Image (spheres, grey):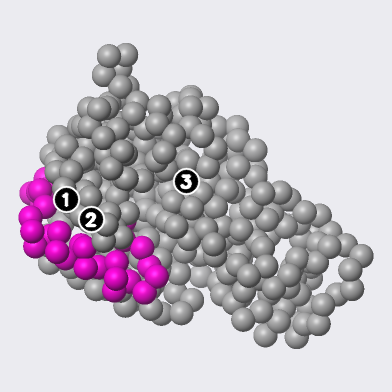
Amino acid sequence: MRQFLTGARIFTGETILDGHGLLVGDGRILDIVAPGRSPPAADRSVALDPGDLLAPGFLDIQVNGGGGILFNGQPTADAALAIVAAHRRFGTTGLLPTVITDTPDCHRAAAEAAVDAVARPGGGVLGIHFEGPFISPQRAGAHDPRFVRTPDDADLDFLCGLPARMQGGRVLLTLAPECVEDAALSRLMAAGVILSVGHTMANAERVVRAFDLGVRGVTHLFNAMPGIANRQPGPAGAALADGRPWCGLIVDGHHVHPLMMRAALAARPRGRMMLVTDAMPPTGTDASSFELNGRTIHRRDGRLVLADGTLAGADLDMAAAVRNAGSLIGLPLEECLRMASLYPAEFLGMAGERGRIAPGWRADLVLLRPDLTVRGTWVDGGWRAADAG
C-alpha cells in the first residue's frame, strides 16, 4: 500500500525540510515531494501534526533487555522480538539484542535466537551483540566474573561461522584486546564479525594496535575502562585521539559527566559517536528491580545498580538519550538524531538502507512531538502508535 505522509517536518538525515510530503510503499521510501508538486498517487493520505518531526528510526547497538525481559535470561527469538517491541515505543526501529558475559550455552542459545529473529520480516532484530565473555576480569563491572575467559578454538569456530548464517544481520563482539591475540582478532574480522573494544585494562598502544588491525568500535566510552591520565591515556585516550573507530556513549547523566561528554564530542570526528542505551529489562515498565546472574539489580534515581552501587546497564531509552544529548551536551537537534540513527547505521555497515530518509531506503521512521517524545513509528512502512505498546 502506498501512503502519502504530509504535514510534519522531515529530517532527512542531513537537514530538516518544511512543507514536504513523504511517499512510502512496499516497505520503502518512494519519494520526497517538495512544496508545489502535485500530490503523488497513493492508496492513503495521512495528515500529520504540523508541529511533529519525521525522522529516521532510531538504531541501538547495545540493548540487554526491555519490557521486563533480559536477553541473557531468555535467549530466544520471541524474547528478542519482544525486547524490540518494548523499545519501539521509544522510537527504536532496529536493535542488536545484547547478551553479556555468561555461559557458552547461553551465548550459543542467544546466537540461534538471533538467527531466527533476523529472518522474521519487520521484527527489527538486526543481529546480535556479544558483550563479553572475552573481557578483563579487572573491568568486569556488573558482568559475572565466573564466566570471564579467553577464547579457545571452539569459540572462534562458532563465532566465525555465525555471520554467514545471519541473513544480512550483524554480529558484534565487545572484547578486551589485551585478552585476545592479534591472530584471533584478524580471524574474527575476516569472517565478518564486527569488533569493539570494551571492559578493558589495555594500554593505549594495545588499543591503537587493535584499531590498526581493523577493530571498528569502542563500547560505552569511558565506562568499564581506566580513566584518562597524562602519562597513561588508556583506552579512552586512544579512542579520543584516533579518528577511525565509532564510539558508543551512554547519555543518561550518570555514566559519564556532561563535561566529559562535551570534551569527547569535541575531540571526535563528526560521525564517529553513537548513542547507545545499554538498556535493561525495566525499560518500558515500572519495575523497581530485576535479577542478573543471581544478583538483584535495583532501579534507583534513574540508575540501575548492584547493592554496592556498581552500575549495571542503564535506565534509558533512545528517545531520552536524544533529548539528553541536546540538554546535557548542547548538541544541535540534527546531530542528536544522527547519533541515534545514521551513525550506528554506518558503524554496522547498513548505511545504504537505514539512517536516512531518501528514495529507496527502508521506511523505518519515527514521529516525534515538539518535546521529542515519540508519537509513533513506522517499520517497513507499517505504523504503530507509541501508546499502543
Left/right placement of residue 19 relative to residue 277 reads: right
The magenta segment: 144-172
**Relative depth, front residue between 308 and 61:** 61
User: Which residue does the numbered mark 3 point to in the structure image?
Assistant: 275
- Amino acid type shown at disc 3: Leu
- Which residue is located at x 40 percent, y 66 percent? 126
Structural crowding at the residue carrying mark 1, measured as other residues with C-alpha within 10 Å and reported as few (<14), some (14–19) or many (≥20): some
Q: Secondary structure at mark 3?
A: strand
**Mark 1 and mark 3: Cα distance apart in space:** 28 Å
Structural crowding at the residue carrying mark 2, measured as other residues with C-alpha within 10 Å and reported as few (<14), some (14–19) or many (≥20): many
Expressed as whole percent of the image width and height from the top left, the position of residue 158 reads 16, 65
Q: Is residue 151 magenta?
A: yes
Expressed as whole percent of the image width and height from the top left, the position of residue 66 reads 38, 61
Number of marks drawn: 3
- Amino acid type shown at disc 2: Leu
User: Which residue does the numbered mark 1 point to in the structure image?
Assistant: 184
Q: Quadrant of residue 83?
A: bottom left
Q: Marks 2 and 3: in contact by CB < 8 Å?
A: no
**Relative depth, front residue between 170 and 192:** 192
- Which residue is located at x 21 percent, y 63 percent? 160
Expressed as whole percent of the image width and height from the top left, the position of residue 214 reads 32, 45
Q: Is residue 168 magenta?
A: yes
Of label 1 and label 3, which has the lower sequence position?
1
Q: Secondary structure at mark 1?
A: helix
Structural crowding at the residue carrying mark 3, measured as other residues with C-alpha within 10 Å and reported as few (<14), some (14–19) or many (≥20): many
**Relative depth, front residue between 213 and 289:** 213
